[in-house]
Amino acid sequence: MNPFVMMHRIIFKPFDFFEDIQSPGIIRIRQAIVLVLCAYIARIISIYSLGFAYETREAYQISILQEAIWILVPWLTWCIAHWAVSAILDGEGKFKEIVYGSAFALVPYIVFIIPVTLLSQILALDESGMINFFTFVIYAWVIWLFILKVKILHNFDLPKTLFIAFLSIVAVFILWFICVLLFGLANQFLNFLLDMVKELRLRG
């Protein structure tokens, strides 16, 4: 199905959207990847289009790579962690449905964050409450879509939906901890090998 049609459905008919993606032939993983990239581009544009009075960082302090990590890593680890948790606890959703639904849950952010940020070009700093409110609404909308996705894809009741969502967040932090731990161990092992090679060269 046309991705713009799907974006329209998740904004105006999110319940139908998550029901629809469980039908065969609807999901296109390529669309999900493009949407996540669009979320990253929207974040970059919103950062650079922020009004001068609202800027909290200098241009040289903004890292394109770091901003990519802020979008891609939480999204990807959520998909993996949530799939693992729901699979253990009898969830009915498939991994590709979770990936697709999680990507389209970012649509409110992709569509609205830039217009809201552009308000900072015309509003004074003491009028920032309006921008903060709209930004809060966007993030709350995205979170609600993530929770709605958990409920509909896995056919859970509300208490179990919230419980699974909580466990998924815990699993995300566990994944990050394991990755940091493995990275630290790999780094130490690499340094050990380099030191050993240097020692052998000195003795040789």
Image (cartoon, rainbow, N blue to C red):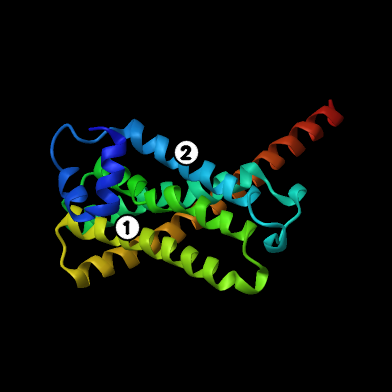
Q: Which of 3 and 102 is in front in this view?
A: 3
The structure residue drawn at horizontal position 39% and vertical position 53%, both measured from the top left corner, is 108
Residue 126: quarter of image = bottom right
Report x, y in % for residue 182.
54, 48
Q: Nearer the viewer, residue 57 or 9?
A: 9
Report x, y in % for residue 56.
71, 62
Q: Which of 2 and 63 is in front in this view?
A: 2
| Structural crowding at the residue carrying mark 2, measured as other residues with C-alpha within 10 Å and reported as few (<14), some (14–19) or many (≥20) | some
Q: Earlier in the sequence, mark 1 or mark 2?
A: 2
Q: Is residue 63 left or right of residue 135?
A: right
> What amino acid is at disc 1?
Phe
Disc 2 element: helix
Q: In this view, does 122 lie to the left or right of 70?
A: right
Looking at the rendered image, the quarter that the C terminus falls into is top right
Q: In this view, does 145 lie above or below 43?
A: below
Q: Is residue 151 above or below residue 96?
A: below
**Residue furthest right as drawn:** 202
Q: In this view, does 33 lie to the left or right of 176?
A: left
| Structural crowding at the residue carrying mark 1, measured as other residues with C-alpha within 10 Å and reported as few (<14), some (14–19) or many (≥20) | some
Report x, y in % for residue 98.
28, 47
Q: In this view, does 78 lie to the left or right of 180?
A: left
Q: What residue sits right under mark 2 in the picture? A: 37
The structure residue drawn at horizontal position 36% and vertical position 45%, both measured from the top left corner, is 103
Disc 1 element: helix
> What amino acid is at disc 2?
Leu
Separation of disc 1 and disc 2 at Cα?
18 Å
The numbered disc on residue 146 is 1
Looking at the rendered image, the quarter that the N terminus falls into is top left
The structure residue drawn at horizontal position 27% and vertical position 69%, both measured from the top left corner, is 163
The numbered disc on residue 200 is none
Report x, y in % for residue 54.
67, 63
Q: In this view, does 186 lie above or below 157?
A: above
